[in-house]
Image (spheres, helix red, strand yellow):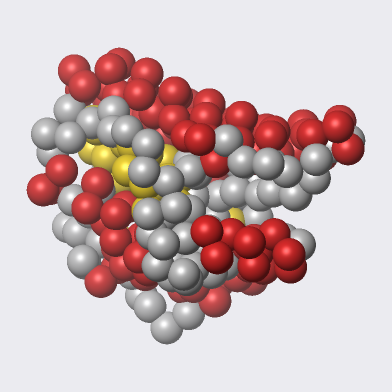
Amino acid sequence: MAQLAVVTGAGSGIGRAIATGLVGQGTRVVAADLDVKGAEETASGCGLITAMRVDVADRASVDALCERVTAELGTPDVLVNAAGWDRTLPFLDTPTDVAERIVAINYLGHVHMCSAFLPGMVEAGEGGRVVNIASDAGRVGSSGEAVYAGAKGGVIALSKSLAREMARHRITVNAVCPGPTDTPLFAAHDEKLREALVKAIPFRRLAQPEEVAAAVLFFASGQAGYITGQVLSVSGGLTMAG
């Protein structure tokens, strides 16, 4: 039977590109998103994609997703945590509720998903792949995104730590760090900030979601079986820190 992948944030943008890219490799995919309509659009016309609802910030919702996936489709071979959200604000102007939501979605969402799905993957004893979508903001910082950058930096550290713990189970854990990408989330940023970011990219253009997905597909593939705990930037050269 074809491998099974669970992709959060699959209702649009990078998550959708990852889901469709995995299907192109013959993988069965659960397109999980809080936006069920978006997930259903991702799944439209493709028998290998099943749309399911999840709120990654809510552990009960994540547990319900895990139970449904396991009962209906089996234990995943691949877990991709791509759900994310941000609001661009100076740190001193960031309300507590906004900061808490950013952390809940962008960091704790990854924690909840890994905590829910990894036990089954370990018990299955077949190895596996976890790919966490972080951000270059988490590697080098980003003005107007201090809390978001902090959360994504946490995702990077989480990925490296899990990679150490999961290695004995042949489960690799890696992180992909997109730079500015042509997604609905980027379009929601202030226009001046969007223009400034594009000008700062050596290629002078945004990444396309499929270009970020390509890095995820590599980490999720058999070719990356000896690669774990790594962080890969897909930013058009915007950041070049080691």
Residue 76 is drawn in which quadrant?
top left
Depicted 131 relative to depicted 44: above or below: above
Q: Would residue 37 be seen by someone viewing this image from the given angle?
A: yes
Q: How many marks?
A: 0
- Determine the residue positioned at 50% across, 44% down: 135
Q: Would residue 13 be seen by someone viewing this image from the given angle?
A: no
- Compared across the picture, whether 151 is left or right of 130 comes to right
- Determine the residue positioned at 51% across, 63% down: 181
Please state which of residues 142 and 126 is positioned toward the viewer in this rendering: 142
- Determine the residue positioned at 55% across, 65% down: 199
Residue 119: x, y in percent?
37, 25
- Compared across the picture, whether 121 is left or right of 152 comes to left
- Determine the residue positioned at 17% across, 35% down: 227
Q: Residue furthest bottom?
A: 45
Please state which of residues 73 and 236 is positioned toward the viewer in this rendering: 236
Residue 200: x, y in percent?
52, 59
- Compared across the picture, whether 177 is left or right of 111 comes to left
Depicted 88 relative to depicted 198: above or below: above
Residue 109: x, y in percent?
58, 36
Depicted 164 relative to depicted 3: above or below: above
Residue 153: x, y in percent?
52, 30
- Compared across the picture, whether 86 is left or right of 108 comes to right
Depicted 154 relative to depicted 74: above or below: above
Please state which of residues 81 and 180 is positioned toward the viewer in this rendering: 180
Which quadrant holds the C terminus?
A: top left
Please state which of residues 241 and 21 is positioned toward the viewer in this rendering: 241
Which quadrant holds the N terminus?
A: bottom left
